[in-house]
């Protein structure tokens, strides 16, 4: 119940698909999705493996609530060793693909080996077949999805695919499902490309069962009410999406601007959620067409947007005149403030291309920002960039280079390396704004101290979704803490990290946690799944998962020395806003964090800690 | 008074809660293909549209059924008798709207039965895009919206 109890193992080298029973003991200890798939990955690969070698594996995993009516219960994750980072990677996506996989009867799909030719996996319930994908070679995610649906004459097939970027080894390629939902970070699409796997196409009609229908209905209705009554999930996110944050974070003095040289962007309003509602001059219509939901989600934060048809990017390209996935906060920041660009239509165009071709807009924007700084310093020049003037604020540089990166052309090939490799190549590693090879998202660790610690200790490299302390430090959820204060942040970060690991293993969206605590989640899992599920059990499970991921990274070669931030955040004080004069207080917070985790001073879990979680 | 489902596509986010509730209420677990209400996403327009049976008064499905398996219940819903349905699918061809479909698992057709007068889809919808309203006044709110625009300028000028 809730779990299907079945795993599909796809050996791409041998070209075989086999069914395996799910290890139910592990399901009890790791729940599903992020936790359970990481357990499988750790037991099957050497963490030192080259991410792009056939010895790396890639797992697509649902959670027990995926495919049920639990609000936001449509999620799946991709778990592998990430190419961008060399650390454990787990990228979570919404849309409708996760539900389809569960409805086809699969908790997980484990991909291993490497196909000798480009293939896609076609699943119709219990029938799984590897199909030749030669006709989709180099095709965008959009064309691949439409092509597969059309080829099989079924518009209801759900497709997750990589674009040319994933095939060509762009280090931060995504896996895109349902046209604009992404398993976005850490280069999971690059790993998929290395296996010569172009797409996974699924049609599922078996249904998802829960343990106790009536109890489940009561728990789900209660959960939906909590989301509806909460101002963030009930009003802010449906109206403005995550873009509700742009002006808020800017005013908090924590909006990284021009590669983190500044932490406030003078034109933040122009690229904000509010601006997406304002009528534009050409046709009187706003950028935002509507909000939309992923499967089962009663929040519906997704943006659907159009680009001004008179804008230079699309005036001669009618194929981009349609509505498509609009700017979420992270992309609006990375393509906008991080590069100093204030042109909402240029940002929307760049975002469309990231979805179309399957690259992570956070890492792309942050890498472009680093390149702009290199250009302004004179480290790279017009000869390097193929004549593109890479100055901060240039919308044309953004839109030209996003296309070059998506298509692996010109200077885009170098931007496809990500900021760490790019800045190292030009002898300026300190200009890469990230941790463990992954670029920061849209909050500055000087203006919001807790998130700096969360970035430094995140198991998948810099990430806001591993411990979203912004909820507390800015929005006051569950309690307001002072963003400029370091005291108490170690405990806050740990609490968010552990709870998040449980949310990410359940099949639900982390955005539900703006309103839900594990006390809201536990009754839904308890009614859906075998066993007794309490909030305490989920929290313990979350901490177990965190320690397991840490073990993966330590075995992969990371050490406590990697739990750090770029010198810019540690040494260069913020120059404006509430955080003026502040640097990150990481060195104060980190030792306390290690202690609370039961780790040594070097950041290694003690034997006692490991034994407490059965690791 | 007879009641009808009223669908306001403008308010639909495409979340599938109605689909899941319908499937569950009719004993098919959480299985979107077994739901008799469906939501269609028109990607390029940014629109989601729920669609189901409108319970025609002179119902093509009912008239075409060779075994008289479709009858009208107390709520005005056209209801399929599983005992009488032989799975011939003629009704699925007759229905101009595609809202009656064959269910291969049972060998019978399935269609909206208004859940006996308390539709599960209505209760599940988070945005009130689907409501259950008196049939005779189903469009009165739309009429009221337009009425509010009538002579609005002259009202304001006084």
Image (cartoon, grey):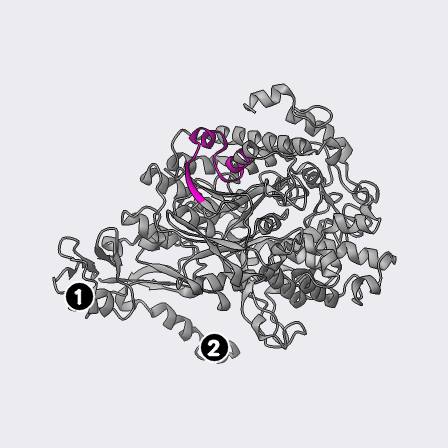
Observer-nearest residue: B128 or A289? Answer: A289
Which quarter of the image is occupied by the N terminus of chain A? top left
Residue receiving disc 2 = B152
Task: Provide the residue span drawn in magenta.
Answer: A17-39
Q: Which mark is residue B62?
A: 1
Q: Quadrant of residue A492?
A: top right
Residue A61 visible in the displayed image: no
Q: Chain of mark 2?
A: B
Give coordinates of residue A55: x percent, y percent.
59, 40
Task: Using residue B98 as the reference point, say whether residue A57 is left or right of it.
Answer: right
| Whole-percent x, y for residue A301 in the image | 53, 55
Give the quarter of the figure containing the C terminus of chain A: top right
Q: How far is mark 2 from mark 1, CA to CA?
A: 46 Å
N-terminal-most mark, 2 or 1: 1
- Residue A99: say if magenta: no
Seen in the picture, residue A323 relative to B117 is either above or below; the reply is below
What residue is shown at x 60% (from left), y 49% (from top)? A194
Kindly identify the residue that appears in the image at 67 percent across and 51 percent down.
A171
Closest to the observer: A434 or A149?
A149
Instruction: Give A501 or A316, whichever is nearer the viewer.
Output: A316
Q: Position of residue A26 (x, y in %)?
A: 47, 30
Callout 2 crowding tier (Cα within 10 Å): few <14, some 14–19, many ≥20: few
Label 1 Cα neighbours within 10 Å, binned few <14 / some 14-19 / many ≥20: many
Residue B117 found in image quarter: bottom left
Whether residue B3 sits left or right of residue A74 in the image: it is left
Q: Quadrant of residue A53?
A: top right
Residue A19: where, in percent of width, then height?
A: 41, 40
Tell me, yes or no, whether dots 2 and 1 are on the same chain. Answer: yes
Q: Which residue lies at the image location 64% right of the left edge and 27% below the top edge?
A: A597
Is the magenta region chiefly helix, strand or loop? helix
């Amino acid at each position: 119940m809730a779990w299907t109890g079945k795993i599909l193992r796809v050996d791409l080298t041998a070209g075989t698909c086999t069914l395996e029973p799910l290890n139910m003991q592990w399901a009890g200890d790791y729940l599903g999705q992020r936790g359970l798939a990481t357990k499988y990955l750790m037991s099957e690969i050497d963490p030192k493996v080259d991410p792009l070698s056939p010895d790396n594996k890639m797992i697509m995993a649902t959670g027990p609530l995926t495919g049920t009516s639990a609000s936001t219960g449509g999620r799946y994750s991709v778990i592998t060793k990430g190419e961008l980072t060399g650390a454990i990677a787990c990228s979570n996506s919404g849309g409708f693909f996760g539900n389809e996989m569960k409805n086809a009867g699969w908790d997980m799909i484990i991909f291993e080996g490497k196909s000798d030719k480009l293939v896609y996996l076609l699943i119709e319930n219990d029938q799984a077949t590897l199909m030749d994908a030669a006709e989709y070679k180099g095709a965008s995610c959009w064309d691949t999805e439409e092509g597969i649906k059309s080829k099989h004459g079924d518009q209801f097939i759900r497709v997750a695919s990589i674009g040319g970027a994933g095939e060509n080894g762009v280090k931060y390629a995504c896996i895109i499902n349902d046209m604009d939902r992404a398993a976005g970070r850490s280069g999971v699409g690059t790993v998929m490309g290395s296996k010569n796997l172009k797409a996974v196409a699924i049609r599922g009609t078996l249904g998802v069962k829960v343990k106790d229908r009536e109890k489940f209905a009561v728990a789900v209705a209660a959960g939906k009410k909590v989301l509806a009554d909460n101002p963030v999930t009930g009003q802010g996110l449906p109206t403005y999406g995550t873009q509700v944050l742009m002006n808020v974070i800017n005013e908090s003095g924590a909006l990284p601007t021009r590669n983190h040289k500044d932490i406030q962007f003078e034109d933040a309003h122009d690229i904000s959620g509010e601006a997406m509602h304002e009528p534009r001059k050409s046709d009187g219509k706003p950028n935002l067409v509507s909000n939309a939901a992923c499967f089962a989600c009663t929040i519906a934060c997704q943006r659907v947007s159009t680009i001004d048809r008179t804008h230079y990017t699309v005036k001669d390209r009618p194929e981009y005149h349609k509505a498509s996935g609009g700017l979420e906060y992270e992309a609006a920041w990375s393509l906008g403030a991080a590069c100093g660009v204030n042109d909402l239509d240029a940002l929307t165009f760049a975002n469309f291309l990231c979805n179309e071709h399957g690259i992570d807009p956070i890492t792309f924007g942050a890498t472009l920002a680093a390149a702009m700084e290199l250009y302004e310093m004179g480290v790279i020049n017009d000869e390097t960039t193929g004549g593109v003037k890479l100055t901060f604020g240039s919308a044309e540089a953004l839109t030209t280079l996003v296309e070059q990166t998506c298509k692996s052309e010109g200077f885009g090939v170098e931007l496809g390396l990500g900021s760490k490799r790019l800045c190292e190549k030009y002898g300026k590693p300190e200009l890469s704004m990230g941790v463990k090879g992954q670029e920061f998202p849209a909050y500055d660790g000087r203006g919001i101290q807790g998130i700096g610690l969360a970035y430094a200790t995140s198991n998948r490299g810099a990430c806001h979704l591993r411990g979203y302390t912004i909820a507390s430090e800015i929005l006051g959820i569950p309690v307001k803490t002072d963003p400029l204060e370091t005291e108490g942040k170690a405990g806050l970060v740990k609490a968010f990290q552990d709870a998040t690991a449980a949310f990410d293993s359940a099949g639900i969206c982390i955005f539900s946690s703006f309103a839900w605590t594990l006390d809201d989640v536990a009754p839904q899992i308890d009614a859906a799944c075998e066993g007794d599920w309490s909030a305490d059990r989920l929290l313990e499970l979350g901490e177990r998962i965190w320690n397991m991921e840490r073990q993966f990274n330590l075995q992969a070669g990371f050490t406590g020395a990697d739990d750090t931030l770029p010198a810019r955040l540690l040494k260069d004080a913020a120059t404006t806003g509430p955080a003026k004069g502040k640097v990150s207080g990481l060195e104060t917070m980190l030792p306390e964090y290690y202690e609370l985790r039961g780790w040594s001073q070097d950041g290694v879990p003690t034997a006692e800690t490991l034994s407490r979680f059965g690791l | 008074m007879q009641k009808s489902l009223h669908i306001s596509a403008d308010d639909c986010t495409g979340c599938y809660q109605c689909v899941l509730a319908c499937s569950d209420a009719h004993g098919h677990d959480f299985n979107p293909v077994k739901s008799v209400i469906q939501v269609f996403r028109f990607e390029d327009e940014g629109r989601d549209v729920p669609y189901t049976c409108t319970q025609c008064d002179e119902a093509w499905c009912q008239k075409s059924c060779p075994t008289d398996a479709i009858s009208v219940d107390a709520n005005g819903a056209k209801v399929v008798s599983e005992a009488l349905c032989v799975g011939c699918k003629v009704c699925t061809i007759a229905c101009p709207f595609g809202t009656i479909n064959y269910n291969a698992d049972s060998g019978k057709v399935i269609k909206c039965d208004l859940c006996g007068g308390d539709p599960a889809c209505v209760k599940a919808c988070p945005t009130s895009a689907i409501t259950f309203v008196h049939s005779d006044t189903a469009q009165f709110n739309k009429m009221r919206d337009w009425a509010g625009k009538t002579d609005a300028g002259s009202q304001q000028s006084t």
